[in-house]
Image (spheres, rainbow, N blue to C red):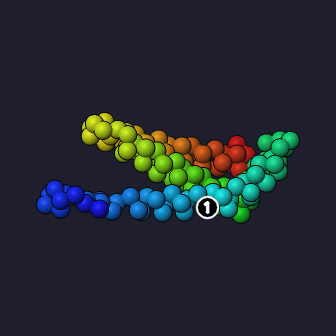
């Protein structure tokens, strides 16, 4: 619904939040489906030495499951934090800096997680 002043100024719903809403729901469903295999993988790693852990993590299906979980969870984190920043930070320059920092932080977390998995799977 728009007010008469909004109709004159052509202001109204921006229609930009729907993509983020559905992307966040998609990543939530992906994480929900992947959490059971990730927990099973973590339980398989309990009590193993580094050689045993690298053997498990070196398996292609396990690497794919972990990679998908990392990507889904960091993307979900990025979207959720961006929505909070956009809703509650009112200074435009601070908002822009916060969104940029959020993007860089999420990318750094994803890359660090992927690097750790690759390092463990290679046995180095």
Q: Nearer the viewer, residue 18 or 61?
A: 18
Placement of the N terminus among the 4 image quadrants: bottom left
Residue drawn at (61%, 61%) of the image: 30
What secondary structure is marked by label 1?
helix
Image quadrant in which you'd find residue 112: top right
Q: Which residue is mark 1?
A: 30
Which is nearer the eye, 24 or 119?
A: 24
Q: Is residue 98 left or right of residue 32?
A: left
Where does the image place residue 52, in percent across and percent down from the top left? 82, 48
Q: Residue at 70% across / 45% down in the picture?
A: 120
Residue at x 66% of width, y 48% of height:
117
Mark 1 crowdedness (10 Å alpha carbons): few <14, some 14-19, many ≥20? some
> Which residue ends up furthest to the right in the rendered image?
47
Whether residue 63 is visible: no
In the figure, is residue 91 to the left or right of 105?
left
Question: Is 22 or 35 nearer to us in this picture?
Answer: 22
**Camera-side residue: 6 or 95?**
6
Q: Residue at x 52, y 48 (%)?
A: 77
User: Residue 70 in the image: x percent, y percent?
Assistant: 60, 52
- Give the vertical position of 31 relative to 94 (above or below): below
Give the position of the C terminus as an image quadrant: top right
Task: Give percent across and percent down for residue 36.
Answer: 74, 57
- Counting labels gives 1
Regarding residue 29, the answer to whether it shows in the image is yes
Q: Quadrant of residue 33?
A: bottom right
In the displayed structure image, the side of residue 120 where residue 11 appears, left or right: left
Q: Position of residue 105 (x, y in %)?
A: 47, 41
Query: As drawn, which residue projects farthest toward the front?
Result: 4
């Amino acid at each position: 619904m728009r007010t008469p002043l909004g109709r004159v100024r052509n202001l109204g719903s921006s229609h930009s939040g729907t993509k983020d809403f559905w992307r966040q729901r998609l990543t939530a469903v992906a994480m929900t489906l992947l959490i059971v295999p990730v927990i099973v993988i973590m339980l398989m790693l309990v009590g193993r030495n580094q050689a045993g852990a690298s053997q498990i993590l070196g398996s292609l299906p396990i690497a794919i499951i972990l990679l998908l979980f990392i990507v889904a969870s960091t993307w979900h984190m990025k979207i959720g934090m961006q929505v909070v920043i956009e809703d509650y930070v009112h200074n435009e320059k601070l908002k822009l800096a916060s969104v940029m920092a959020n993007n860089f932080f999420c990318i750094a977390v994803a890359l660090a997680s992927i690097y750790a998995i690759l390092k463990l799977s290679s046995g180095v």
